[in-house]
Image (cartoon, grey):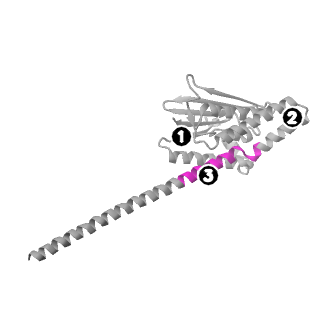
């Protein structure tokens, strides 16, 4: 009886050891699987970020804008306007350098964003023979060198207004850009006096040009940013013709968590 009891006890200890080893093996397997899944998700996220960086670069340096810029420089040279050609070439090269330097960054300072927009709009104004006015304003007490935001979110909408919103308009194009703090958010407003969203969408070329792709990529960027950030970025587009006053144009508002 004693021998049988010892055998049962030994068997129980052996079973306990097997159970412990099995649990440890399962735990190691679970940890390994969790690590593998986490690593795969990280790789997928990095790949997605990389793809968006490449798309952003292609969006900003689109052939349409580059072609128009080179054509404008050629026109200044042929018209014997070396000063204007020099200014245009200088601003164009500075803009390209800024885009190349910042397109891969997750965030840039508001100071740098405004610098990019200023170069871009000055080129467009010169290209359009001054048939464009613009202003960039900031709220009081803001420190643009300390505020960060995703790079070049507003530029595609500004380009869209210039290339499509002002087409067919009878007045000089005007774009007003403002940056203000609203609680813990940065509010970015872009207002133009173009023909408005509905009329612009009626133009068939809007869907055929590079711009439609640029806008699509921007929407994908906004969706991607909201998936990867705890605080969500909000975005609205308003046709001013539908607001009291009956003015034409478009108002775009970004609210970016800081």
Residue drawn at x 53%, y 55% is 43
Q: CA distance from mark 3 to mark 2?
A: 37 Å
Drawn side of residue 46 relative to residue 61, left or right: left
Looking at the image, which residue sits at the far left? 1
**Can you see residue 196?**
no
Residue linked to disc 1: 234
N-term mark: 1 or 2: 2
Drawn side of residue 117 relative to residue 17, left or right: right
Drawn side of residue 152 relative to residue 63, left or right: left
Please provide the residue range marked out in magenta: 44-65
Q: Quadrant of residue 91?
A: top right
Residue drawn at x 69%, y 48% is 58
Label 1 neighbour load within 10 Å: few <14, some 14-19, many 20+: some
Nearer the viewer's eye, disc 1 or disc 2? 2
- Cβ atoms under marks 1 and 3 closer than 8 Å: no
Residue drawn at x 77%, y 43% is 66
Nearer the viewer's eye, disc 1 or disc 3? 3
Q: Quadrant of residue 95?
A: top right
SS at mark 1? strand
Residue linked to disc 3: 51
Residue drawn at x 38%, y 61% is 30
Residue linked to disc 2: 76
Magenta stretch holds residue 190: no
Magenta stretch holds residue 47: yes
Q: CA distance from mark 1 to mark 3?
A: 22 Å
Label 3 neighbour load within 10 Å: few <14, some 14-19, many 20+: few
N-term mark: 3 or 2: 3
- Cβ atoms under marks 3 and 2 closer than 8 Å: no
Q: CA distance from mark 1 to mark 2?
A: 42 Å
N-term mark: 1 or 3: 3
Label 2 neighbour load within 10 Å: few <14, some 14-19, many 20+: some
Looking at the image, which residue sits at the far top? 140
């Amino acid at each position: 009886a004693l021998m049988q009891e010892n055998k049962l006890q030994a068997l129980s200890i052996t079973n306990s050891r097997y159970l412990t080893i099995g649990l440890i093996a399962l735990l190691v397997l679970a940890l390994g699987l969790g690590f593998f899944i986490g690593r795969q998700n990280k790789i997928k996220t990095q790949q997605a970020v990389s793809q968006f960086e490449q798309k952003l670069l292609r969006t900003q340096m689109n052939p349409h804008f580059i072609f128009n810029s080179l054509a404008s420089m050629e026109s200044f040279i042929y018209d014997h306007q070396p000063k204007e050609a020099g200014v245009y070439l200088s601003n164009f090269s500075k803009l390209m350098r800024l885009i190349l330097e910042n397109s891969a960054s997750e965030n840039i300072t508001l100071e740098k964003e405004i610098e990019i927009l200023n170069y871009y709009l000055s080129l467009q104004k010169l290209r359009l023979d001054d048939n464009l006015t613009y202003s960039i304003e900031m709220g009081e007490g803001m420190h643009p060198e300390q505020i960060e935001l995703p790079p070049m979110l507003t530029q595609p909408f500004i380009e869209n207004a210039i290339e499509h919103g002002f087409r067919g308009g009878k007045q000089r194009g005007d774009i007003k850009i403002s940056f203000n703090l609203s609680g813990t958010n940065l509010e970015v407003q872009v207002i133009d006096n173009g023909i408005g969203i509905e009329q612009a969408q009626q133009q068939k070329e809007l869907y055929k040009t590079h711009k439609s792709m640029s806008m699509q990529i921007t929407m994908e960027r906004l969706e991607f940013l909201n998936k990867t950030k705890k605080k969500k970025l909000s975005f609205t587009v308003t046709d001013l013709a539908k607001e009291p006053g009956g003015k034409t144009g478009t108002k775009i508002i970004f609210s970016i968590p800081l």
